[in-house]
Image: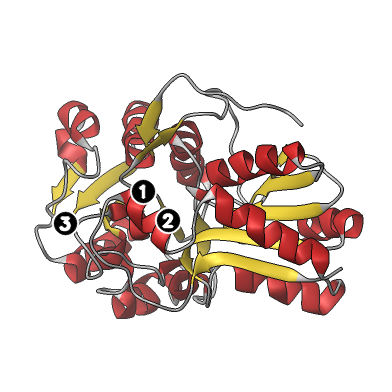
Amino acid sequence: MKKYTFTEKKDTRSGFGAGMHVLGQQNPNVVALCADLVGSLKLEPFIKENPERFIQCGISEANMIGLSAGLTIGGKIPFATTFANFATGRVYDQIRQSVAYSNKNVKICASHAGLTLGEDGATHQILEDLGMMKMLPGMTVINPCDFNQTKAATIAIAEYEGPVYLRFGRPVIPVFTDPDQKFEIGKAWMVNEGTDVSIFATGHMVWEAIQAGEMLEAEGINAEIINIHTIKPLDEEAILKSVEKTGCVVTAEEHNRIGGLGDSVAQVLVKHKLAPQEYVAVNDSFGESGTPAQLLEKYGLTAKHIVEAAKRAIARK
């Protein structure tokens, strides 16, 4: 098993900010919009260098989506930014009608997703956003795993034609992917090859899956770990190729178990290759206030929980 190490921890939202800084220098059509959360979205470097390409919408998320849709008509590439809860749940109608239905080239970039927003509690911790966004026809849904991958994804979606939902978060986590990586939308990343169980992870859970793989290896279990950073379009070929080898599956996500990555993988298995599957996800509940570490432990989203799920999946083969 390949060993992954890190020398620093950073938040994925800072990866987004770094990607926007690059786009500000490279692509004159990129415009940033924000709903009164510039600091939280790490947009300061972009704004400092490109003040004429920034629109502060205030606490008016629906208006921000409408402005973004309009900007695309003039050839601009709008990046609409706010917390994930406000970027999806608060403005779902505007996204559906003005962006998805019209197939507008709007990039909806959402920070503070999942439980690891932490102390702000359930009202801000959206756990339904991946499901909501993947159900919209034509919407691409991306959930990168660390600072470097988020930066690369941010740059990549500017070149992609069509609506995109890009999800990232607040907590500092290990930076373990290549800083010079090329991000391929819709192409899963093989983290570690294995033969006993397939672990498909997304977002912050990729690092937990890597730790789980090492724990399983110590017990003689060879786990295949794949980073599903693009929830839609889903890399079905990578999923099926892996399951052909291992015969069982664990999905790991910082999201409600209903409607997220796990359900997308289950649909692939039902259609093409039946196999036992275990979910590591929030079990159909809201979150609560707490530190990220406390919440991940309470809601069963740690490496230990992935190990337990892998053993259950293997036992069902």
Do tag 1 and tag 2 residues touch (Cβ < 8 Å)?
Answer: yes
**Residue pointed to by mark 1:** 293
Position of residue 24 measured from the top left corner of the image (x, y, whole percent): 31, 31
**Residue pointed to by mark 2:** 297
Specify the amino acid type for callout 2: Glu
| Residue shown at the point (46%, 61%) measured from the top left | 163
State which mark lies toward you, 2 or 3: 2
Of the pair 192 and 103, the residue shown nearer to us: 192
| Residue shown at the point (49%, 61%) measured from the top left | 300
Of the pair 97 and 59, the residue shown nearer to us: 59
Mark 2 surroundings within 10 Å by alpha-carbon count, few (fewer than 14), some (14 through 19), many (20 or more) = few
The alpha-carbon separation of the residues under discs 1 and 2 comes to: 6 Å
The answer to whether residue 227 is left or right of residue 95 is: right
**Residue pointed to by mark 3:** 35
SS under mark 3: loop
N-terminal of the pair, mark 1 or mark 3, is 3
SS under mark 1: helix
Q: Is residue 308 above or below residue 208?
A: below
Tell me, yes or no, if residue 77 can be seen here. Answer: no
Do tag 2 and tag 3 residues touch (Cβ < 8 Å)?
Answer: no
SS under mark 2: helix
Specify the amino acid type for callout 3: Ala
Q: Is residue 48 above or below residue 258?
A: above
Specify the amino acid type for callout 1: Ala
Which quadrant would the C terminus be assigned to in this image?
Answer: bottom right
Mark 3 surroundings within 10 Å by alpha-carbon count, few (fewer than 14), some (14 through 19), many (20 or more) = many
